[in-house]
Amino acid sequence: MSESVLKAKSNQHNLVNYEETYQNFNWEEAKKAFSWNDTGKVNIAYEAVDRHAENPDKKDQVALHYVALDRKESLTFEQLSLKSNQFANVLKSQGIEKGDRVFLFMPRSPEFYASFFGVLKVGAIAGPLFEAFMEQAVQDRLEDSEAKMLITTPELLSRVPVKELPNLEKVVLVGEAKDISNGYVDYHKEMDQASDQFNIEWVDLEDGMLIHYTSGSTGKPKGVYHVHNAMVQHYQTGKWVLDLQEGDVYWCTADPGWVTGTSYGIFAPWLNGVTNVVVGGRFTPEAWYGALDDYNVSVWYSAPTAFRKLMSIGEETVKQFDLSSVRHILSVGEPLNPKVIYWGKKAFELRIHDTWWMTETGAQLICNYPSMDIRPGSMGKPIPGVVASIVDDQGEELPPNQMGNLAIKAGWPSMMRAIYKRPEKYESYFLNGWYVSGDSAYRDEDGYFWFQGRLDDVINTSGERVGPFEVESKLIEHEAVSEAGVIGKPDPERGEIIKAFIALNEGYEESDELLEDIRQYVKTGFAAHAAPREIEVTEAIPKTRSGKIMRRLLKSRELGLPEGDTSTLEE
Ligand code: WT7
């Protein structure tokens, strides 16, 4: 355990007394910030956008600064409200109703955010998909969710197997589309004709608003289902953890295809009424430092993999930019190495605050706050209103310093309410009243939590969660591959890289070309981030007698560790 502590600045106002807040806070208190607490009329889009657009002091404030290589645009809260009203009218005219699943498959753009809120305003459920997904990944998600509509771009349309998707009634195309035929809707044309006034659909706090697909160790991706009630926690953690204040300019680097990009790239900042920066396009250190500098970003939420990349290019680059506006930095997605925190202290003269949560948890749960001493390597402490613990496999709590399952007392506002159409999968997360995360960790005597690793085979590569099963399934679709086992291999920059072990079919010889072809096959058929960086050909993949791939064994062999229990290994 690390003994070093990074002290909070004495003038930090936020959560001044953590212990006291933790003792006294309950979620009922947080609800008072919302208009529905008085009116009973609920919709997260109203609280995040329209409420500010109706406020004379706020309506002309920039809600969104969008910047990409070839485009720069800003929208005020009023403009975002009107544009999302227009899109809500388009959706209505296309027959979209409350509860329908509407998916968005496109790069970040002002149109994305207007469409996203349009979907929420009609009471439909939004499903944002990462733009790098290829055909199989897109199909799996639209099929499972029985999506009625997809909003995409003409460029990405070739990756949508429209004919394989009987429930998909409409495709909205954002951008110059050559032939708009049956079932296709021209975004810009429809928007031009649509009214910018819309009567928002009031919903119940427990009504669906968002589905994010995420990976487990087995089976197809899971549709993690979130409800409007999550806003209470988005808002409150925005205050406590992001420390958002009037006048802040906030930037979360995550894409809304992942939960960080919605909970903290959309909801937390806008529920708190701050200006939000969105940077499109690929990561380059210059573009990122440039965005911090150009927009005078004050609060910055990113990920260890990005910090490590910035660290690797050295401090000279940092010095070319004026980053004096930045006052608070946060991290999520994978373990934040103490080395990165110390680098951050030097490069930015600020602490980097680690936060822990998951797609399923909907919002931050265990965090470091501005007012808290940081123990580098620790994820921090549970936010007020949340009880976290370490439990054994029977759901019994373990004493400090013992490693076990990181678990949360079920029932916080932003918790997923279902795994779409898979109740048994949903139930499998819970034990003895605890939500069991799948991470192992311990808690020290002072209540700080320390991440140890995943307990399942899920891979975390550059902060992206990849299920080995999906990659294996794609690999064996390649004509040369008979069997495949996929693991995460530790990597200093990416956290883990994907390594595949494959057995070849009769008649195929190992060659660099073949392995590259197999890699490309996953990359273009499934998703670039899921393509194995390393492929090793072996005679056979170790399996249990019941036929389960023993990834644990592949991993210990790869790392030169003891093989552990191999009693179930197939002869
Ligand atoms: C898994 C969840 C919702 C945030 C984005 C990732 C890992 C997340 C941390 C952290 C160590 C972390 C865990 C978790 N993880 N934050 N601060 N330290 N590991 O969401 O894709 O659902 O992945 O990411 O293993 O279970 P996700």
Image (spheres, grey):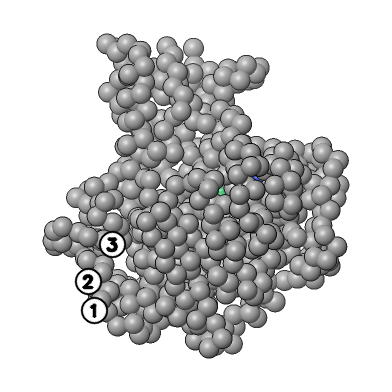
Residue 532 placement (x, y as % from top left): 44, 29
Decide: is 290 above or below 537: below
Q: Earlier in the sequence, mark 3 or mark 2?
A: 3
Q: Amino acid at mark 2?
A: Lys
Badge 3 crowding class, 10 Å Cα cut-off, few under 14, some 14 to 19, many 20 or more, is some
Q: Quadrant of residue 169?
A: bottom left
Find the distance from the CA under tag 3 to the CA under tag 1.
15 Å
- Residue at (46, 28) in percent of width and height: 533
Q: Which residue is tagged 2?
A: 189
Residue pictured at 36% horizontal, 33% vertical? 522
Helix, strand or loop at mark 1: helix
Three-letter code, disc 3: Val
Q: Quadrant of residue 202?
A: bottom left
- For the residues labelled 1 and 2, the Cα–Cα distance comes to 7 Å
On the image, the x and y values in percent for residue 266 come to: 51, 65
The residue tagged 1 is 193
Q: Which mark is residue 66?
A: none
Q: Which residue is mark 3?
A: 174
> In this rendering, would 60 be left or right of 3?
left
